[in-house]
Image: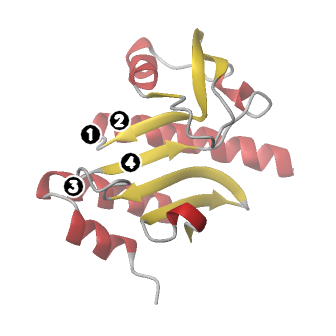
Amino acid sequence: MIENIENIIRNILSEAEIGNALNFVTYLKKNEMEFIRGKGYWKDKFYWIMNYKNENVCSILIGPEEKTDPSQWLIWSENSNDNSSHWFENIILDKYIKEIAWKNIDFCGNCGYCLGGKCKTIFGKEFNNVCGTTFLFKNPNAETLDFMKKMIEFRKNEIFKSIG
């Protein structure tokens, strides 16, 4: 039986993190995300891939990847590459929101997943050695969740446009 993500959040995360995590999961469900449990390396972890119309939107890990911080939760943005990340250029955001994005860039850690970091222009600013996931959010606060929700909205619109 696949465990319910809400129960896992309540059982693993600290009181300080539970509300934000449940809020985000509720948002994802209201936005028709498909929750797919991780396979391979991720199968024994509380890891989900979120898809919309069979396209990746983000991934969530509840608890530690390597058992170092049990109250941690992580969210990676979709697995963008040079071809699919062009929508970062077309989004108009205020400077405050851009700074949230820039603080959460996922720089390549040479894990082999993205085959090495790339140079990406993200909201008008160039970054080197960026992972394929572009953003990584660790224990996001309410403001960061608002940014993430905007990114999901933009990603859904991009998916919707691509399938016509």
Residues at badges 1 and 2 in contact (C-beta under 8 Å)?
yes
Q: Residues within 10 Å of mark 2 (few under 14, many from 20)?
A: some
* Front-most of residues 28 and 60: 60
Percent across and percent down for residue 134 are 57, 32
Q: Amino acid at mark 2?
A: Thr
Percent across and percent down for residue 9 are 28, 66
136 to 71, vertically: above or below: above
Q: Earlier in the sequence, mark 4 or mark 1?
A: 4
Q: Amino acid at mark 1?
A: Asn
Q: Earlier in the sequence, mark 3 or mark 2?
A: 3
95 to 57, vertically: above or below: above
Identify the image quadrant of residue 26.
Answer: bottom left
Question: Which of label 1 and label 3 is nearer to you?
Answer: 3
Judging by the rendered image, the residue that carries numbered circle 2 is: 144
Left or right, residue 94 beside residue 84: left
Question: Which of label 4 and label 2 is nearer to you?
Answer: 4
* Front-most of residues 138 and 150: 138
Number of numbered labels in the structure image: 4
Q: Which disc, if any, is residue 7?
A: none
Q: Amino acid at mark 4?
A: Leu
Q: Residues within 10 Å of mark 4 (few under 14, many from 20)?
A: some
Look at 31% across and 59% down and name the residue there: 63
24 to 98, vertically: above or below: below
Look at 45% across and 40% down and name the residue there: 148
Residues at badges 1 and 3 in contact (C-beta under 8 Å)?
no
Judging by the rendered image, the residue that carries numbered circle 3 is: 71
How far apart are labels 3 and 2 at the CA level? 18 Å
Judging by the rendered image, the residue that carries numbered circle 1 is: 141
Judging by the rendered image, the residue that carries numbered circle 4 is: 74
Mark 3 secondary-structure assignment? loop
